[in-house]
Image (cartoon, rainbow, N blue to C red):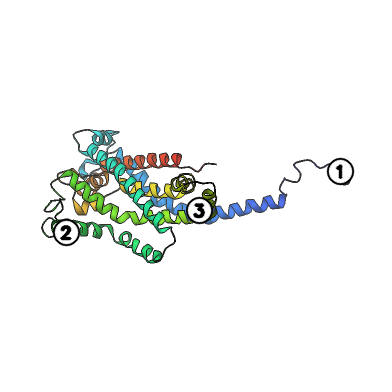
């Protein structure tokens, strides 16, 4: 009440008309500024998705243009999931590799990030050196690892033999399915762990130091502090790393192409590898489109699960 006049409770909290108009104007300006980038992204990503979706329901083989592009319904998808096509095993290989590689790479990246987050001398140099494997092109990195794993001239064989360790004179690529996948995992981990470490290190450095001091005063140990302070506040960075690494694992192609060529036999074929073969070797755009659609659906499902599990607590 002011000067005998009664003021309604919501009068002081109601925004002034001028301020509301200014806020709406700023929002429209923001939408106008980002709209060109959104349109470009939609053109770049939307057209291939729609084109692949259309291909997946049609027969479209560049090597047989006389057959045209008739509608075949779910025929390409039935071929994908049929046991005799060899594509269903490629899906199993991809999912299994993703399930194994992503936890290993993220755990190693988190461990390195925790070490680099501690104040010590030489951390600047260590962070710079950490980025070197990530900066090397994937095909070049895979070729180097293939050369190192050569049982006759590779450095790995020489070191194992000189140290009298098991594994010397072992054909890592081309004969054993397990050894081939282990070799791919080692090469992939060596290259992508730096990415995980850098992103998680940025997330760790964004956590206020006062929270750790308060946890220490409350008597929380190292594991308790990590579980109740570090891990919850690191969820956004973890979400970024998990989504990017999962997508990269689902789309793994370069290392497979350079190191194993899908062998021995078809033991290390992945979805991306068979998709490449369908598009560029067989010229089958219908089957290639179906494979691409399946990959997109799997990636979206996994990203949604990550988002639900790691969403911030409000």
Local secondary structure at mark 3: loop
Work out which quarter of the rendered image holds the N terminus and state it.
top right
Instruction: Tell me the crowding category of disc 1: few under 14, some 14 to 19, or many 20 or more residues within 10 angstroms, Cα based.
Output: few
Q: Is residue 276 left or right of residue 164?
A: right
- Disc on the earlier residue, 1 or 3: 1
Figure check: 109 above or below 8: below
| Disc on the earlier residue, 3 or 2 | 2
Marks 1/3 in contact by CB < 8 Å: the verdict is no
Name which quarter of the figure residue 123 lies in.
Answer: bottom left
Q: Is residue 188 left or right of residue 31?
A: left
Give the structural element (helix, strand or loop) at label 1: loop
Q: Which residue is drawn at 51% across and 46% down?
A: 219
Of callouts 2 and 1, the N-terminal one: 1
Residue 145: x and y, percent?
Answer: 21, 57
Q: Mark 2 points at which residue?
A: 159
Q: Residue tagged by mark 1?
A: 5
Q: Which is more foreground, mark 2 or mark 1?
A: 2
Placement of 88 over or under 36, stated as above or below: above
Q: Distance between the residues labelled 2 and 1?
A: 90 Å
Q: Can residue 59 be seen in this view?
A: no
Give me the residue at 55% from left, 52% from top.
Answer: 31
Q: Mark 3 against mark 2, which lies toward the viewer? A: 2
Q: Residue at x 13, y 53 (%)?
A: 168
Label 1 and label 3: CA atoms lie apart by: 49 Å
Which quadrant, please, contains the C terminus? top right
Tell us which disc is closer to us: 1 or 3. Answer: 3
Where is residue 237 shown, x and y percent of the image?
A: 44, 50
**Of 185 and 297, the residue lying toward us:** 185
As drawn, the label of residue 207 is: 3
State how far apart marks 3 and 2 are (Cα): 42 Å
């Amino acid at each position: 009440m002011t000067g005998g006049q009664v003021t309604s409770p919501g009068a002081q909290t109601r925004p002034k008309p001028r301020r509301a108009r200014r806020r709406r104007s700023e929002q429209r300006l923001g939408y106008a500024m980002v709209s060109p980038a959104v349109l470009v992204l939609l053109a770049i990503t939307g057209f291939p998705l729609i084109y692949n979706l259309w291909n997946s329901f049609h027969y479209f083989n560049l090597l047989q243009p006389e057959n045209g592009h008739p509608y075949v319904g779910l025929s390409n998808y039935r071929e994908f999931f049929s046991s005799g096509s060899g594509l269903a095993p490629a899906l199993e290989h991809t999912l299994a590799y993703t399930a194994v590689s992503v936890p290993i790479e993220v755990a190693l990246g988190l461990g390195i990030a925790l070490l680099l987050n501690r104040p010590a001398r030489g951390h600047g140099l260590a962070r710079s050196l950490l980025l070197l494997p990530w900066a090397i092109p994937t095909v070049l990195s895979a070729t180097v690892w293939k050369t190192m794993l050569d049982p006759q001239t590779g450095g790995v064989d020489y070191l194992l033999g000189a140290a009298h360790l098991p594994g010397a004179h072992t054909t890592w690529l081309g004969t054993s399915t397990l050894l081939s996948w282990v070799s791919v995992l080692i090469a992939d981990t060596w290259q992508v762990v730096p990415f995980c470490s850098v992103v998680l290190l940025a997330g760790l450095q964004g956590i206020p130091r006062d929270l750790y001091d308060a946890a220490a005063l409350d008597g929380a140990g190292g594991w308790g502090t990590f579980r109740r302070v570090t891990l919850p506040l690191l969820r956004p960075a973890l979400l970024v790393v998990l989504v990017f690494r999962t997508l990269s694992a689902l789309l793994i192609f370069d290392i497979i192409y350079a190191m194993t060529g899908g062998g021995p036999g078809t033991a290390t074929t992945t979805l991306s590898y068979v998709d490449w073969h369908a598009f560029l070797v067989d010229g089958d755009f219908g089957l290639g489109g179906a494979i691409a659609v399946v990959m997109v659906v799997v990636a979206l499902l996994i990203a949604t699960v990550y988002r639900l599990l790691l969403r911030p607590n409000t």
